[in-house]
Amino acid sequence: MPFAETPLRDEYAAAVERVAGRTLDALRGGGGAAALADPDAAVSRPLLAAVRVLGADLFAPQLLTGTEPDGPTAALLAEARRVFPTPAAATPEATLAVAWQEWAARQVLARTPYADTASAATPAAPPGPADLGWQLWSVRMSQLSALALPGLDGPVHDAARTDTLGLARGTVRSMLRRDFTTAVRLARWLAWTGAEDRPPRLEVAPILERIRLVGIGAVRTRLELVVAERLLEGAPK
């Protein structure tokens, strides 16, 4: 029943914000591992659900400073993936987005003792701007912003390198629509392409500063913002 599910959904959403906040603190603190779990307490299902949602971004503090993913976070993510199987999606497009988010998490875990060898296949390449048009393609790319991290590379990244103009157009369109969540995710991709020595076609720093001044409430979105800023500073490839 909806009334029974709402408190649980709120608890899980709050857990996502807490985990994003601890990851953000680690990123701002110089790139150490985030203290996601209390070592003296049992790991709760909301915490595991939040870890599942954040996926590869849990390791942003390390990947952005050129250090290896830490074992405790990897163990927590591996446990979260065991407890919460890959979520079902309502559409083929959403299914493909979930598959690529899963791929990113597996790629990071592969660098730790907690590699997931049961599902190592690379998903199908998403449709590009030639198939979708730059508006829809940029929205799809915003949904895959967790892939915009050093050490991850695949067809999605190739598309970002190839069509920085589409990403720039999507960023400007999102800013004009005051859709700052989509804008910061696309600006993150542009910052990633800049770290790859590709022309971003747009000055990203003023975009990020504008979003910061507007004020974005969700901690998870602020994490995206700081990741983009670190990429602009020149993250390791």
Image (spheres, rainbow, N blue to C red):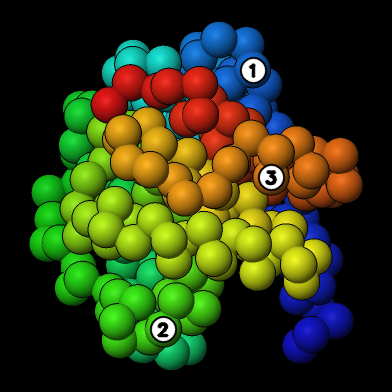
Which residue sits at x=12%, y=49%?
Answer: 117
Circle 3 residues within 10 Å: few <14, some 14–19, many ≥20: some
Image quarter for residue 158? bottom left
Structural distance between the alpha carbons of marks 3 and 2: 23 Å
How many other residues sit within 10 Å of disc 2, few (<14), some (14-19) or many (≥20)? few
The one of 155 and 30 positioned closer to us in this rendering:
155
Residue occupied by mark 1: 28
* Residue 232 percent across, percent down from the top left: 51, 29
Quarter placement of the C terminus:
top left
Is label 1 in a helix, a strand or a loop?
A: helix
The type of residue carrying mark 2 is: Gly
Residue 39 appears in which quarter of the rendering? Answer: top right
Indicate which disc, 3 or 2, sits on the residue closer to the N terminus. 2
Residue 17 drawn at (x, y percent): 72, 44
Q: Please say whether residue 45 is visible from this viewpoint.
A: no
Residue named by callout 3? 207
Which of pointers 2 and 1 lies earlier in the amino acid sequence? Answer: 1
